[in-house]
Amino acid sequence: MPEKRPFERLPADVCPINYSLCLKPDLLDFTFEGKLEASAQVRQATNQIVMNCADIDIITASYVPEGDEEIHATGFNYQNEDEKVTLSFPSTLQPGTGTLKIDFVGELNDKMKGFYRSKYTTPSGEVRYAAVTQFEATDARRAFPCWDEPAIKATFDISLVVPKDRVALSNMNVIDRKPYPDDENVVEVKFARTPVMSTYLVAFVVGEYDFVETRSKDGVCVRVYTPVGKAEQGKFALEVAAKTLPFYKDYFNVPYPLPKIDLIAIADFAAGKEWWTHLWLNEGFASWIEYLCVDHCFPEYDIWTQFVSADYTRAQELDALDNSHPIEVSVGHPSEVDEIFDAISYSKGASVIRMLHDYIGDKIEDDRLLRLSQRKFCASGPYVGEDCPQWMVPITISTSEDSSRAKMKILMDKPEMNVVLKDVKPDQWVKLNLGTVGFYRTQYSSAMLESLLPGIRDLSLPPVDRLGLQNDLFSLARAGIISTVEVLKVMEAFVNEPNYTVWSDLSCNLGILSTLLSHTDFYEEIQEFVKDVFSPIGERLGWDPKPGEGHLDALLRGLVLGKLGKAGHKATLEEARRRFKDHVEGKQILSADLRSPVYLTVLKHGDGTTLDIMLKLHKQADMQEEKNRIERVLGATLSPELIQKVLTFALSLSVEGFAVDKMAGEVKAFFESHPAPSAERTIQQCCENILLNAAWLKRDAESIHQYLLQRKASPPTA
């Protein structure tokens, strides 16, 4: 055997968080232009960034630390043999987050890897080319500079600039399609943000295709794209795809994570590669599970007999040769990956997994493995200190089998540990911190979080756990540890929530988010989200008390109507105005529980006359409670002229809702020149909150906007 080439993995001092990538392929010259803006985290101070890059020419590169000046790269050192590039910077990049910007060009190659051209013939006989991708295992680097190792995961925002008569596809659904400024024959197609994933899973296609479409029983949009004029030939593939998604969801207890799935027939395609040492497990398992699925969908095929003929015996023949190899092979340089794409990795791997499955059976699914880790939570984001403190943390774990009792209690006395929960069925949820007693926040994997949503909808998760789960997620998002979009998805699950305290906390958090987005161009979209979340409970409660209601029901009615009214819910606004008019005219005095939501609603959507009436009510009020009630809602008015009038009633100014860096400096400067020793800590906390809000807005505004646009295009069903 020749000696293996020495090879080093990418340094870990800089890692990606999100890739915002725009590509413009030229289907005549077989080139493409690219613009990359990658949100990244510098973990250790460095003056260079090392990435994977192959057959790409970088035009410009720069790094913009969050809240600081742009630093332009002064050199690009290509290591062609190792398919890497080193970007050198004139000053040190300090630990923290920032944006890496790269403009580059590349070739639509004819090697069937990376971003390449695929020849096809139109129905009229004309030869044309599509632009397609094949990134598995190590060829994303041929389409854009990236950290092209499967363990270095991130989210992806893909945009393609393409001829307007071509189909553009990517992993996610289209959220925007608009004319390109410089060319009326070209459009820019923007896709939704992907989940966190490896670079080799990114895909895009530009070409001419027809498609057939259906939905799986789980509601996933399934399409099969075919050459033009051959859509009928995609119907069987469509039928099979629609059957397989529910099968895999039920088998793994993990739903398909994307809103759509596209299958496409490409004329020139080299498929079926993975990566590194555990290739056999990935591809061997994929080979085995596809047989299992076919057997489920088409038992008449007798597919396992075909498996023995096509895979089992073939693997035994190859494995008997002296030049065979173990199914698990250590891989160093990426070029060595190709050497083990053979029937040993695929067919023997599948045969060994089939043997183990036959021996173990599916019952192993009844045991749930949890991987726990602990780290310090900081409102400013992931802890970056050298020595992360550790604690002994009592952990309670409950399941939907009995949500009121801990299935397991452990003392976590190390940074990481694995826990096996016995006899947990695939459809059961698992929840940490039963009763929200433990003084810690919990971050769940996407799959665990998804499994908890039914427990919120059907109320099998107790109220205190529903509250704690939502509050943890909101705080994690505010700190930049998870995406705010994940919180919005969880908030949508509270459609059947009856508990006032749970709604109060959710309302408070959604109010913070609304304030954060109040000066964006998609503020109306977040108000639509508020209306969607609160409308069902508003309709159930109505305006008037029902027999047998308690104190908390009255509080909940006031909370919900106030939220809907402030968001501009049409029916709520109309009824609030009617009741306010009757109240002012003395026809029907508002109950104390309804005054705050009615006052808030009419002021938010009222004019100067409304404000004058409210100030008159304040002057006439003989109870301090009523005066305070009016004072608390005066800030809801929107007109700058009316706000000036309201300021005469203001006793203090809260700054925690601000989300502009400059505002923190202004507040700090004011109190430096006007010292207030007794309020010093409060002032510092306020300034810190302003800076945190500014970072949050900058970090998540675009992904929130995309999610809200996606909801508008495809409204969720309860």
Image (tube, helix red, strand yellow):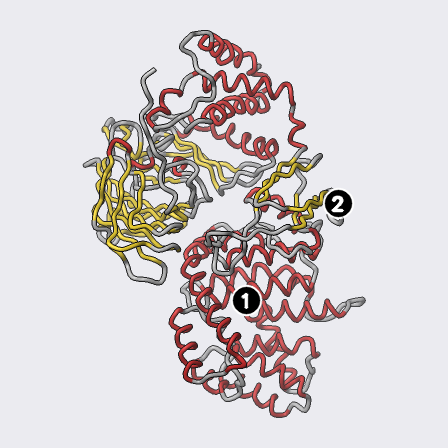
Residue 559 x/y as whole percent:
64, 69
Secondary element under disc 1, as helix, strand or loop, is: helix
Nearest the camera: 506 or 53? Answer: 53
Nearest the camera: 701 or 228? Answer: 701
Q: Are marks 1 and 2 in contact (CB under 8 Å)?
A: no
Choose top left, top right, bottom left or bottom right for residue 420.
top right
- Mark 1 surroundings within 10 Å by alpha-carbon count, few (fewer than 14), some (14 through 19), many (20 or more): some
Q: Amino acid at mark 2?
A: Asp
The residue under the point 64% across, 36% down is 368
The residue under the point 39% across, 74% down is 665
Label 1, label 2: how far apart the Cα atoms are: 33 Å
Choose top left, top right, bottom left or bottom right for residue 417.
top right
Task: Decide which of tag 1 and tag 2 comes sooner along the chain.
Answer: 2
Q: In what quadrant of the picture does the N terminus appear? A: top left
Say which residue label 2 marks: 402
- Mark 2 surroundings within 10 Å by alpha-carbon count, few (fewer than 14), some (14 through 19), many (20 or more): few
* Image height of 674 relative to 124, above or below: below
The residue under the point 38% across, 72% down is 662
* Image height of 626 relative to 236, above or below: below
Nearest the camera: 172 or 396? Answer: 396
Numbered circle sitting on residue 511: 1
Nearest the camera: 706 or 700? Answer: 700
Residue 670 x/y as whole percent:
42, 81
For the question of whether residue 635 can be seen, the reply is yes
